[in-house]
Amino acid sequence: MLRQTRRSLLLLAMLIFLTPLQSIAQPTQEKIVRVAVIGGMVYADLWREIAQRFEEKTGYEVQVVISGERPELKEAIELGNVDLLTMHSGDITTDLVADGHGVNMRPWTRNDLVIWGPSSDPAGIRGMTDGAAALAKIANTQSVHSPLIETHQFRVF
């Protein structure tokens, strides 16, 4: 009986002392995704909408570690500062995967270039599907236009 009592006390002592150590030894996994996002997605407010929907659906918190141009994002991935990269495909993304900084690269969005103008459509381009032909028609009809090139660094009209 004494032997059984000692075992029980020993087991109880082990449970009391080892349980806290076990919980300390197993770190809690935070539900955070650190991302590097190409600038245009942030400037257009697209990323905010995507992140918000993801957070609502999964319970993960999305933290934008860096947003900017491709070389800046590349460096963040190489340093291990982010979990997810969103930027245009090309040599940089291919090299990152080849160098072991990423896996399973896949396209999930695309850019659309759009020509818009007044509802009166002075150049008569509404419905055209060939951008070069539409721009030529705008030029040939000498329609008033304001070409816009915009990044986070500059805006040219």
Image: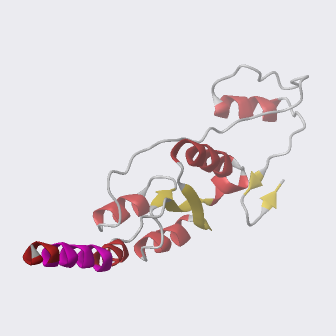
* Count of marks overlaid on the render: 0
- Left or right of 94: which side holds 47? right
Report which quarter residue 63 is drawn in.
Answer: bottom right
Q: Is residue 126 above or below residue 78?
A: above
Give the magenta-colored segment's residue range: 6-17
- Residue at image position (55%, 72%) is 72
What residue is drawn where x is 25% and y is 73%?
Answer: 12
Say whether residue 73 is left or right of residue 13.
right
45 magenta-colored: no
Task: Decide which of 57, 129 is in the foreground and name it.
Answer: 57
Is residue 82 found left or right of 23 in the rendered image?
A: right
- Residue sitting at 35 percent across and 72 percent down? 23
Please name the predominant secondary structure of the magenta segment in the image: helix
Residue closest to the eye, 28 or 47: 28
- The front one of 80 and 137 is 80
Place residue 112 in its image quadrant: top right
Rendered residue at 63%/27% (across/down) = 130
Residue 89 image point, x, y percent = 45, 52
The percent position of residue 138, horizontal first and vertical second, equals: 80, 32
Depth order, front residue of 137/11: 11
Membership of 8 in magenta stretch: yes
Examine the image and state in which quarter residue 15 appears: bottom left
